[in-house]
Amino acid sequence: MKCPFIIILSIFFFVSFERTFAQKQNEDSLAITKQKAIIDFLHISPQDNIVDIGTGGGNNLIPVTNQYPLMRFTAEDIDSNVCNKKNLLKTINRLGNKTSIKNFSVQYGDEKSTKLPAAGFSKILAFDVIHEMTYRSEMLNDFKRILLNNGAVYIEEILVHKKVKKDRVCNYPYLTEQELKKLLADNHYSIKKEQVVYDTGVNKYIKIFECVPEKTG
C-alpha cells in the first residue's frame, strides 16, 4: 500500500500540473486574441514603411512581422545590448520562424531622438514604451519629423485605473488613460481611433491608439 504522504504529494503535483497547463493554454489563447486585435487595428499594407520604437528584444514587433514575412521593418532602440539582430533572431525562433532576420534594419537613437531619416515612415509603432520615456514630448515631436504625410503613430500601452508608484515587472509607473491622452493633446496629436485589446479585469488594461499630428498653420 502506498504511503498516504506519497499519494497526497502525487495528487498535489498532478493538480499543479493541470493548473499550470490550463493557465498556459489560457495565456496562449489571450495572446493570440490580443495579436489578432492589434493586426486588425494596424491595417498594414505591403506599401507601408514601418518602424517600431523601443523594440528591445522584439517581443511586441515579431508577432506583427510574422503576419507579413515578405515585408521589411525598422527596429529602433537606444540600447544595443538588448536590441540587436542576435536577440531578434532568438525571438523569431521562439515565436515560430515565420519571418526572417534579413527583414530587419536595426537603428539606434537616444532618449530625445530616434536619429532616423526625416519623412521616412508611414506607420510608427510605439508599443509599451511611452511610459518608460524620460523625454516624452521630445520623442513625440521627433515622431512627427520621421512620419510621412498622412502617416500615423500607433501607441499601445498598458494603462491603469489607479496609479501605483511603479510596476513590479517593468519598474516604471504605468500611465492612466487620462494622462496618456493629455500627453498626446499637449503635443498636438489627435486620436483617430482607439481600442482595448486586453483587460485584466483588475487595475490594468491594454489599449491601442491610432494618432496623427494636428495640422498647423
Image (cartoon, grey):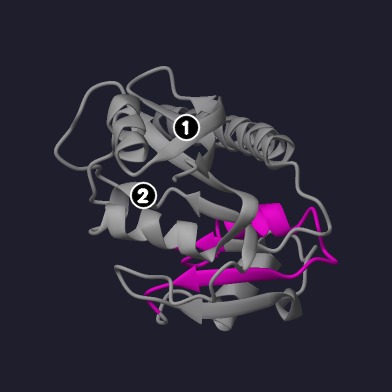
Estimate the x, y position of residue 51 in percent, counting from the top left.
59, 63
SS state under label 1: strand
Q: Is residue 21 on the magenta stretch?
A: no
Estimate the x, y position of residue 204 in percent, counting from the top left.
37, 27
Badge 2: residue crowd in 10 Å (few <14, some 14–19, many ≥20): many
Name the image quarter holding the N terminus: top right
Q: Nearer the viewer, residue 25 or 124?
A: 124
Which residue is under mark 1? 206
Please, is residue 181 above or below residue 105 in the view? above
- Residue drawn 62% across the image and 38% down it: 31
* Label number found at residue 130: 2
Amino acid type, label 1: Ile
- Residue drawn 36% across the image and 31% down it: 181
- Number of marks in the image? 2
| Left or right of 84, for residue 68 | right
Quadrant of residue 81 within the rendered picture: bottom left
Q: Is residue 63 on the magenta stretch?
A: yes
Quadrant of residue 62 within the rendered picture: bottom right
Label 1, label 2: how many angstroms apart (C-alpha)? 13 Å
Estimate the x, y position of residue 177 in percent, counting from the top left.
35, 27
Q: Does the residue at mark 1 contact the one at mark 2 (Cβ under 8 Å)?
A: no
SS state under label 2: helix
Which region is colored magenta?
52-79
Amino acid type, label 2: Ile
- First-in-chain label (1 vs 2): 2
* Label number found at residue 75: none
Foreground mark, 1 or 2?
A: 2
Estimate the x, y position of residue 86 in percent, counting from the top left.
57, 82
